[in-house]
Amino acid sequence: MSGSRMGAGESGGPSARSRALSVLRVRSRALAVALLPAACAVILLVGGSAGHLTGAGWDLARRVLTPLAVLVLLLAAGVALVVARARPAMSPTVPVAEEAAPDLYRMVRDLADRLDVPAPSAIALTPDCDSWLEDRTHPAHGPPPAEEHDDVAGAGRPPRGAPAAPVLVIGSPFLWWMRVGELRAVLAPVVAGTGPSAHPDIAAARRFVQGLDAAVAVASAPRRGPVARGVLAVVGWAARLLLSGCRVHAAEMERGVAAAAADRAQAVDYGLRIVAQEQVGLAYAGWDRLLTRVALPAWRMGRWPSRLNAGVVAALTELSRRDRLAEGFASRLGERPACDLLEEPGTVDEATSLLAARLFHGGPAETGPAWSPVPWGDYPEEVVDRKWRTDAARLHRVLDALHVPPAHIDPAAPDGPTLTRVLVHLTTREAPAEQPPYPAAVPVPVPVPVPALASAPADGETGGRTGGEEDHDLSGTTTRSAALAARLSAELAREERAPASAARSSPAAGQEGAVPSAGPDAAAPFRDDRPLPLFPLQSPRTARELLADHITAMVCCAAMDTAGAVPGLDWLDGPTLLVDGVRAADLSPQVLALIEDGDPAGLRLWLTRHGIRPEKPVRLV
């Protein structure tokens, strides 16, 4: 097929090939530098054996240059070995076999024929709003060990002996939100990139750059012995030096390849592609909102929604209903969705949903009692209700640690966790002569090193914040709110550190010579397996935000137990409280007024308006 040639009419084709040759020249120069001492040593040795180049000076040169040449050759061989065996970075994806999506493969091959380029060797899905071609023909892309990310590291790999064509990676939200014609229009420039990718010079240049990048990653890996670290330090230095020499050329080569692919794809569905690009932006907004507002709370509870891609359709449909700018997008739902190109969309959706949880949150690869799927119908009861009651229980544990007594307003009230206890503790009294309700009215009445706990590093959502950042975040709150927020941060950090500490102290991790799965594997010393999550969704929540979330959870628990409210799911905003079937609004400003000003009047008025009784005990987990 002529697709392996870049036509003269494609603006980026000649530029891409020229830059590829520049990258290959860097490789050739490095090889020449490595062979130069050996060549000089061979000349000196041959000249001496033939009776030429004799004398004390030439003998000294031979004695110095020969060991130097051997040393340089050994170092060059070591660098070449690491570059050849190091596994280049490969995007975590879900493979889609041709038997599972014959219509999708047929559409892609038809698109490649229309573009006159080689068809991709395989198709894989990624839980992201993007599509690209990925070269997975490197010899080091062998099967990883069974215990390591087997469903991620080897996903989408073409079989041995297959043509050296790249793998087409498609964003899974596109399949569920876009129509078939829109997906074909969006994929046209991506599939057109197989033409430049098949050019021998460009393919060789890419393999060289990928090998160097993988070698740098291997040299930077921790948990190695001192000898290995010293050797790999030299390898890393050489790989970085070569990368710096070809970085600009490689970047310009990729730009040329993209320009050539875009020029080739202009003749295919160009008008429809303009409309489809609007759907790309809309899908990205809905996907990001779904992950951060809906999926993330479930992941934190040890549950992962098993139909994320179906959820993005519901989220975007809801956005179309609310936003006038999105009017007309919902009318497309009558057309055939691109997910119909799959034989079993539900199975693929579940696999991509699990991968999304692993990438963005770091959950395990397999389901279990502490990591199980949750359907959307059970989300309010199993995620929202449990999340609120867990947060409310943590809030009362911290109040117990601060020796905050039960609410004194109603001594006859039953003993138990109440919302009134929180309101009374956070209320600021302006009368200076008024007696405090209990002796321990100072911010931290027990001798516990609160700042040290609050600023302790954690691997989760509260880690990485310094004491100065916490002080700045809590500067606009009352003294009691600041103390309670600091203790909540410390408690949550302690809970998040506990599983990591247990994993590090497990027998498998404590065996002598054992290497954690996130680090290099002894059986494959040049693998580059990065730990998950690769792409955390959000920065750590501030102490003020944690306190607001916990107070809101306590209010919602009181509403459910005393006013008949129920937990709900909003596709754009996540967990929500439904009172008489209507979403409760205006709660956040009242909670913030209590935290920042110590004024509970607005929140008490909100509670009265909805028939919520704060003095009644609530059920916790």
Image: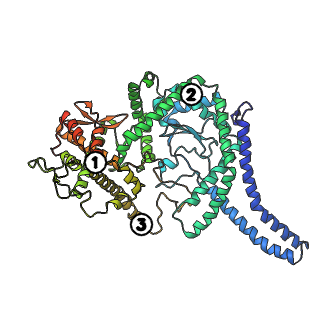
Left or right position of 464 against 489: right
480 relative to 74, above or below: above
Q: Earlier in the sequence, mark 3 or mark 1?
A: 1
Q: Which residue ends up furthest to the bottom in the rendered image?
A: 56
Residue ID at (24%, 62%) = 446
Residue where numbered disc 2 is placed: 185
Q: Amino acid at mark 3?
A: Gly
Residue ID at (39%, 34%) = 311
Q: In the image, residue 259 lies at what x, y percent?
A: 66, 35
Q: Secondary structure at mark 3?
A: helix
Q: Which mark is residue 510?
A: 3
Proximity of marks 3 and 2: CB atoms separated by less than 8 Å: no
In-front residue for pair 315/183: 315
Q: Amino acid at mark 1?
A: Asp
Q: Secondary structure at mark 1?
A: helix
Residue ID at (55%, 33%) = 105
Category of crowding for the residue at label 1, using alpha-carbon neighbours closer than 10 angstroms: few (below 14), some (14–19), many (at least 20): many
Residue where numbered disc 1 is placed: 391
